[in-house]
Image (cartoon, rainbow, N blue to C red):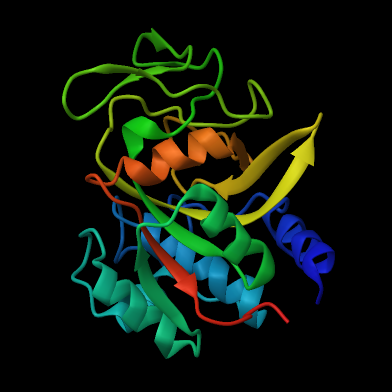
Amino acid sequence: MNIAHRRDHVMRILERRNRYQFGQPKSDLVEQSGCTDTSIQLVVLMAKGKSVSLNDVRRRSGAPQDTPMSTTEALRALHSYGLPYEAVTGLQASGAVHIAKTRGPVIIAENYWAHPQWMGYTYLGRTLKGRATNLQGKSVRVGLSHPLRRSGLTQWDYRLGHAVLLGTDTYEDRTHYAVVRDPNHNSAARPERPAYDLVTMQQLNRMMKSWYTYSLVLAPTRVVIK
């Protein structure tokens, strides 16, 4: 596949609006801690054309039940599916996007406060307008996800570690966007299922750098969507 074909392939899968971390069958091993498992599940589908359960991902990783997955455990699961991924630190948004569109999807670690928000979404009595509080208690303008009022962070009260999938990139109205799937949707309290969040390069940089002063991604070492 060339870059355009790879983009179309990734977008078609995301636009099915399934595979979120809540509500899936065979997912009792992950419960509230399935963001990395769900991202790996999507990578397997995109790269291998294989549908796997969250429980299967969790068992292959060796991670304990209902705990956040470590980098080592995530790589163990990816490698068990024959996917050549490695942990990379220090990347900028442009570098992560280049890998995603030329090789295959990238799993990004972020602290969730930094994720662009769903414009006007009201959750637990607060209406989101693009501002968040970082881990040092400082108010930060994280901005809004596109499409407006149809994508982005809704669970503002959670600010800690999270994994999202960077699938590819796109341009709309002369703006360069990263195409990101946030697994943290489809709960009983927040049933919305956005296909993806479109975030600017500036927003993606903030997301990546929110991870304890350095960026951490799991990236393919060679082309995995062929």
Query: Residue 163 vs residue 117: left or right?
Result: left
Query: Residue 134 vs residue 121: left or right?
Result: left
- 169 and 147: which is toward the camera: 169
Q: Position of residue 172 (x, y in %)?
A: 79, 34
Q: Position of residue 110 (x, y in %)?
A: 35, 46
Q: State whether residue 166 appears in this view.
A: no
Q: Quadrant of the N terminus?
A: bottom right
Q: How many marks?
A: 0
* Rendered position, 184 above or below 225: above
- 156 and 56: which is toward the camera: 156
- 194 and 200: which is toward the camera: 200
Q: Quadrant of the C terminus?
A: bottom right
- 125 and 215: which is toward the camera: 215
* Rendered position, 211 above or below 95: above
Q: State whether residue 168 appears in this view.
A: yes
* Rendered position, 108 above or below 220: above
Query: Residue 189 vs residue 5: left or right?
Result: left
Residue at 42% from the left image edge and 30% from the top image edge:
189
Q: Position of residue 151 (x, y in %)?
A: 60, 31
Residue at 67% from the left image edge and 79% from the top image edge:
49
The picture quadrant where one finds residue 61 is: bottom left
Q: Position of residue 115 (x, y in %)?
A: 43, 34
Residue at 33% from the left image edge and 72% from the top image edge:
74
Residue at 48% from the left image edge and 58% from the top image edge:
24
* Rendered position, 187 above or below 223: above
